[in-house]
Image: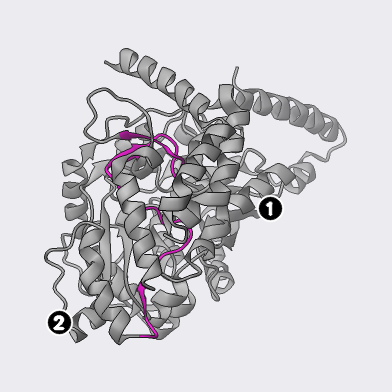
Amino acid sequence: MSKSKKRYSLVISLLMAFMSVLSACGGSKEASESAGTGNDTVQLIWYTIGTPQKDVDKVMEEVSKYTKEKINATVTMKMVDWGDYSQKMQVNVASGEPMDIIFTSAGGFDYVQNARKGAFLELDELLPQYGQDLIKTINPAFLSGSKVDGHNYGIPANKELPQQEVWRFNKTLLDKYKLDTSGVRTLDSLEPLLKTIKENEPSVTPFAMDKNYVPYVPYDYVIQNLPMAVKLDTTDFKIVNILETPEMKEALTTMNKYYKAGYISSEAATTGSTNDLTTSGNWFLDRAQTQPLADNQWSASYGYPVVSTPASDAIITNTSVQGSIMAISANSEYPEKAMEFLNLLNTDPVLRNMVDSGIEGTHYKKVNDTHMENLPESKNYDMPSYSLGNNMLLYLNSNDPDNKWEEFKKFNAEGVDSPILSFNFDASKVSAELIAVQNVKEQYWAALMTGTIDPATNLDQVIEKFNQAGLEKVMAEAQSQLDAWRAENK
């Protein structure tokens, strides 16, 4: 019997015994209501990622009015900034902080590892009981691809399925200097454009990034942002240390050159978010994950035109399938109600759009039945849409075509599978080594990836630090599991 089933059995047994005693005293109705199983309104606590927004409480008041009417629950949202999210959630889980719903992903509060650690509730029973509408709505590839050891521990956002990187540009600056992006693809190809901005716009950050930035190379990571990876065109499925690959060495050298040239902020390795730059418009380019018609969304969100050009192919990876998930905390007081809320959020356009865009008439206005546009107050409620549920319920931006969601389905169908799609590494046998490896990562990774330190004098030292921490042992265990997975899945 799974841990979650045992927990439920124990709780149900105790509750039945408790209710029997009160029933004999004629108090079963009062007991039921005081326990939150009668007419009492349940308060759900939702932790999610993103720069905390000024109007989040104001919007959640309106959300709660709606959810109280629909499922007799109110919602409190707690936002944690991008760079702080994983660490904050680790502390919350360890301390038993009251939480019901938790944003998780392959790269933000690691979904697979924390599911295995028991941070999230197994949903195999709750999902068919309280999420029937949701199951019919979400692309089944997300639900199957987000299983951990055969079980669902979260509800993925219904969005783009492949992961494709793009270079994003502040179009105002592109137009001002008549810069051509048609030949842009590689990291090196950015140099002439960055040089122009650096020489002419002293108040602008030419290459915007935060401490989570990692140069793109054509590999899929076994664990996001740790050095173990498999090349996308592999034939031998060998796990390699990404820092030892020629592609990453070249990328890190270029990043350091850009840093020394002043194209990258001197604080990039410690910056948790670039939200201040996108709000002010004082940036020229960055890298982001795209989706169909993403330029329209970014432009509407920022209030000025943004355009992009591909930096990679569209690849379906564990990171993309598990790129945005809402889990129910293993310590949730109200798991059934949390599942009801997730079901509603992913199937009800009114709720989904309120959570995403705020209050109609305050933060946005409807242009017609399917399109909307932001109002000036939207700057106080600018949310990361991808992290908040079923994107295909969202109103279209005023410049979006009517067939936007059909374009998403086409994009999803054309994505190419990573060679290690659905392989989830179980690190339980090397947990001590993995902790040590992660500690090394915290010390050196951001500085190396943002070009802050010179790989010519530091890369070998960092590689040695990883190996001393046990990276080679972790990689050997991962390779053994990958070989077994390949044999099993042919």
Crowding at dot 2, Cα within 10 Å, few <14 / some 14-19 / many 20+, comes out as few
Quick one: label 2 or label 1, which is nearer the N terminus?
1
Residue 121 visible within the image: no
Along the line of sight, the residue nearer the viewer: 27 or 14: 14
Determine contact: label 2, label 1, CB under 8 Å.
no
Residue 195 visible within the image: yes
Residue 252, percent from left and from top? 36, 53
Question: What residue sits 37% from the left and 28% below the top?
Answer: 239
User: Mark 1: which secondary structure?
Assistant: loop
Q: Quadrant of the N terminus?
A: top right
Along the line of sight, the residue nearer the viewer: 343 or 236: 236
User: Mark 2: which secondary structure?
Assistant: loop
Q: Which residue is mark 2?
A: 178
Question: What residue sits 26% from the left and 58% below the top?
Answer: 187
Displayed quadrant of residue 423: top left
Q: Amino acid at mark 1?
A: Asp
Q: Is residue 348 above or below residue 9?
A: below
Displayed quadrant of residue 330: top right
Mark 2 and mark 1: span between their CA atoms?
Answer: 62 Å
Along the line of sight, the residue nearer the viewer: 213 or 101: 213
Query: Does the stretch in magenta take in 490?
Result: no
Residue 277, percent from left and from top? 42, 76
Residue 203, percent from left and from top? 39, 85
Q: Which residue is mark 1?
A: 40
The secondary structure making up most of the magenta span is: loop
Residue 466, percent from left and from top? 53, 37
Q: Amino acid at mark 2?
A: Lys
Name the outermost residue toward the right. 25
Residue segment shown in magenta: 202-230
